[in-house]
Image (spheres, rainbow, N blue to C red):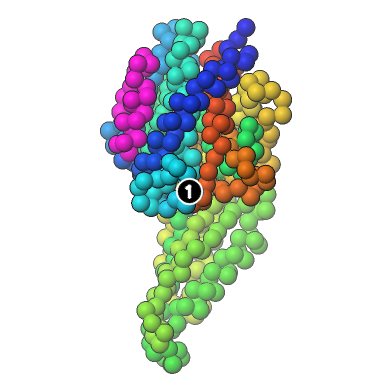
Amino acid sequence: MTLLEGNLVSAASDLLPSAIELRRKLHRHPELGLDLPKTQAAVLEELEGLGLKVSLGRGLSSVVADLETGRPGPRILLRGDMDALPMPEDTGLEFSSESANTMHACGHDAHTAMLVGAARLLSARQEQLSGSIRFMFQPGEEGSGGAAVMINEGVLDGVDAAFAMHVAPNLPSGMVAWKAGPVMASADVVKIIVTGRGGHASTPHWACDPVPVACEIVLALQAMITRTVDAFDPAVLTIAQINAGTTDNVIPEKVELIGTLRAVSEGTRHAVWDRVRQVAQGIAEAHGCSTEVQIIEGYPVTVNTPEFAEFAASVVEKTFGDGHCFKMPAPVMGAEDFSYVLAKVPGAMLFLGVCPAEHKNSLLAPACHSNKMVLNEASMADGIALHAAVAVSFLQGGYALS
């Protein structure tokens, strides 16, 4: 009898109350970026006594905990991110954030609690395992690139494969979504400064008004995306800010456009960079203005190793039964810094459905990054079991390393 035949699910259910307690504690006290001292302390307290080899980050408040069985075998990494978002919370939960304009609106509190639960579950069964498991508790996923910092500090040293999951409030609870290959998009910031010549608003012919030029650039960028990018290798470009002027009767000298660019292949990503520059510069010059185009490179495309994604999906079916897993038809256009991990070692990120029961239509539930985002805490037991099942199956040879 293997460890995948039912007992992991039961054991995860037993750990659910403690996981909920930790998740709520973290939810009340969210922290931002790379420096998460309270979160780090809470994780360390939970891991105490499990017999794990624990190390702390130097450039960030990370925790790396190794379960060493003492028997030869591969090493798998399980990752949970820990940081929150700089935004207000309007959920009305009794354990709502007590930190102003800071909220766990992306489920990282649940990710951390589930990974702690998996560490508890697997530590109690280490005598039945060979190889090792590394638990990666990571700050700074929300734009700070904490994964890259941890990689530079050696978190992937000796690691053969990596696994992570992300909660999905818009998936029914108990469902797990997966995809081989590109699963999440890259994310870059686009800044365009259009410079003209300021003047009196009553005499635009004596000035060189950059405002209509900037507006034309915004529209032309949307046309560029639809006319030059393959619909089956897509990109999304959104100009989210237009900043110009100080009053109603002054033509400003400059307009600043700021937006985000998403793509699901590195080829399209870099091609669109060039086209953004071409469109902006061409339109500006046609109107006598000049431009400065900045592409601030963000997270790369998150690419699941196809064979590992299929392996993880098979573990879902073995662990929870048929009908609990489905293959995603397309990538998610959100971005993830787990992309840095998957660029180095085989692995995959899956999505765990956590839609609350009160939302009959999961697609209408508040999504991640919503000020009203909530989740079904009972689904965290599934996350604990899935972390454990993937690790156990991997160590038992369920995935063939090349």
Residue occupying image coordinates x 30% and y 36%: 37
Left or right: 87 in relation to 271: left
Q: Give me the residue at 66% from left, 20% from top.
A: 318
Tag 1 secondary structure: loop
Bin the neighbour count of mark 1 within 10 Å (Cα to Cα): few under 14, some 14-19, many 20 and up: few
Q: Residue at x 68, y 29 (%)?
A: 324
- View extreme (bottom): residue: 203
Magenta-highlighted residues = 36-56
Q: Position of residue 6 (x, y in %)?
A: 62, 15
Can residue 217 be seen in the rendering of this structure?
yes
**In this view, 161 is above or below 355:** above
Q: Identify which residue, 155 or 317, lies in the foreground.
A: 317
Q: Nearer the viewer, residue 260 or 220?
A: 260
Residue that carries the numbered disc 1 in the rendered image: 92
Q: Name the residue located 53 percent from the left edge and 43 percent from the top edge.
A: 374
Establish if 222 lies above or below 216: above
Residue 46 location, x and y as percent? 37, 24
Quarter that holds the N terminus: top right
Q: Is residue 144 visible?
A: no
Q: How many marks?
A: 1
53 in the magenta segment? yes
